[in-house]
Image (spheres, grey):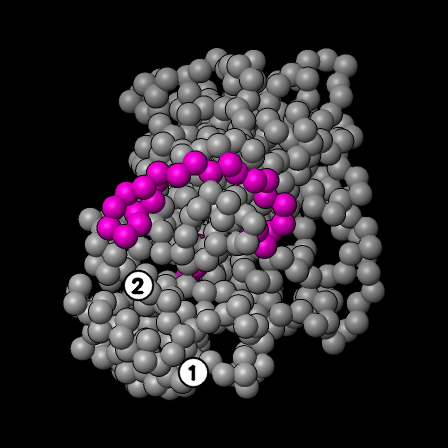
Amino acid sequence: MQTLSPQSSRPIARNRRKALLATAVAAILATGIGAAGLSQAQTEAQVPALTATTEHGGQFQLADIIERVQPAVVNIVAQQSAIRPANMRGMDPRMEEMLRRFFGPGMPPGHPDQDQPMQSANALGSGFIIDSEGYVVTNNHVIEGAEQVEVVLEDGTTLPARVVGTDPRSDLAVLKVESDKPLPSVAFGDSDAARVGEWVVAIGNPFGLGGTATAGIISARGRDIQSGPYDDYLQIDAPINRGNSGGPVFDTGGRVIGINTAIFSPNGGSVGIGFAIPASQAQPAIQQMIENGHVTRGWLGVQIQPVTEEIRSSLGLENTHGALISDVSTDSPAHKAGLEVTDVILDFDGQAVDDSRSLVRLVGRAKPDQKVPVTVWREGKKQTLKVKLGTLQDPEQEVVAANQPGSDTGKLGLKVAPLDKQAREQLTLDDSVQGVLVTGVAPNSSAAKQGLRPGDVILRIGQSPVDTPQSLATAVESASKQGDSVLALVRRGDSQRFVALKLG
């Protein structure tokens, strides 16, 4: 396991991971949600279930669980050729610093100054067989870019594997091997029912050592490690290391409730904080890959952000649940259904939206082309609309919750000017954008504490569009009669978001 990298034993590489180094989390690759479930045959127990009360001398016999399930856990060898070491010339400086921390004072072979040639490497990871026909589940990052993949069984038998499907957003992949005899397999369990404090067993291939079992408990649920829009990991303290990627996490019934994909590690090794994709999220994606070779997800076509306490107060909401729409893409499903900026989505397809990230997961799990009811809070009351979802095509379409700045309060403290031709040219804004240009922000003001800066454009205050300094002042005065803060829609570059500005 490498610091700030996936748990496979391949060299740390890939442009996609460089952007994730700002967090202190290892292997933070996207977790996604599919739209279908595994068939009954694939969810039935292939190994006899053990109960949590199996005891010997007053202690749980984890050995019984391991003995039964370990034959279905495999090692993954992904042959990759013509790849350059992760620390190639031009890499992100933060990656270089991470390499120094992991490898020690001296840079490892392939330092940018050494101009190392392209070379081949093997990625070593873990996986598990989900039925006797030879379907194998692992992480996408274990086999990504591989020219040849092999699966090594517990008895040492090596079988060539065919890649059935991959899904980078969920960091899952499905392989297929052929065998002249039935293969041992394991079944998925109910990860939604797993509780914090319950025992779990992880089996995998750490550092290429082969089948290794570790035990611990579920430390937390619903972890968001900032790896992608679908984060909802199980956190476990069973030691897992580089090479455990794609390996299963078993409950005390011997069923898979998670798939290891990440660790938090300041030193490159296990410190007892690991993350696993819950089985309830992995199963639909796996089923889609088996059936179609890929995963499809629903697309709504909005930008959203959390509902802070200040925003709640400004909109008259009862609580901070829901997701606030800050932008609606033209010709998107949301646009066609009549969803609007300042709507707060409270329910999606009959399920409550706790926060912006829960909406992301609900939309990703929904089937494209289906009509779903969406309940929103608009102008002080609830309203339900029917939305026919689209199909997510590009990463840029992903429904991602915007980062919410701090909620410290203070004076409003803004200087504004008309959005004239010169300003439009400097900001590359066309005539369709109507608003007021921010030219100054007073230190320690509410606007400053909310992150506003010169060059931002205020598009509206509450429900009122603004296009001149006077209309802005009028809108603020009107909104101030409703409470002690105003809700401003602010555009910066190609994105826009709401901020709640406290009135002094």
State the quadrant of the C terminus. bottom left
Residue 72 % position (x, y):
60, 24
In this rendering, the answer to whether 73 lies above or below 300 is: above
Q: Where is mark 1, residue-wise?
A: 418
Q: Residue at x 77, y 14 (%)?
A: 180
What's drawn in magenta, residue-wise? 375-403
From the viewer's perspective, is 31 left or right of 10?
A: left
Q: Is residue 382 magenta?
A: yes
Q: CA distance from mark 2 to mark 1?
A: 19 Å
Work out whether residue 27 can be spotted: no
Which amino acid does the dot numbered 1 rest on? Pro
- The image position of residue 332, as x and y in percent, is 54, 48
Mark 2 and mark 1 lie on one chain; the one further toward the N terminus is 1
- Say which residue appears at 40% left-offset and 74% top-offset: 467
Q: Give the number of callouts.
A: 2
Q: Secondary structure at mark 2?
A: loop
Q: Position of residue 111 (x, y in %)?
A: 71, 70
Which residue appears at 44% of the width and 33% of the height? 372
Disc 2 residue crowd, few under 14, some 14–19, many 20+, Cα 10 Å? many
Of residues 237 and 302, which is closer to you in this image? 302
Amino acid type, residue under disc 2 in the picture: Gly
Residue 462: give its label. Answer: 2
Q: Position of residue 448 (x, y in %)?
A: 33, 78
Q: Is residue 458 above or below residue 327?
A: below
**Residue 48 sits above or below residue 160 on the image:** above
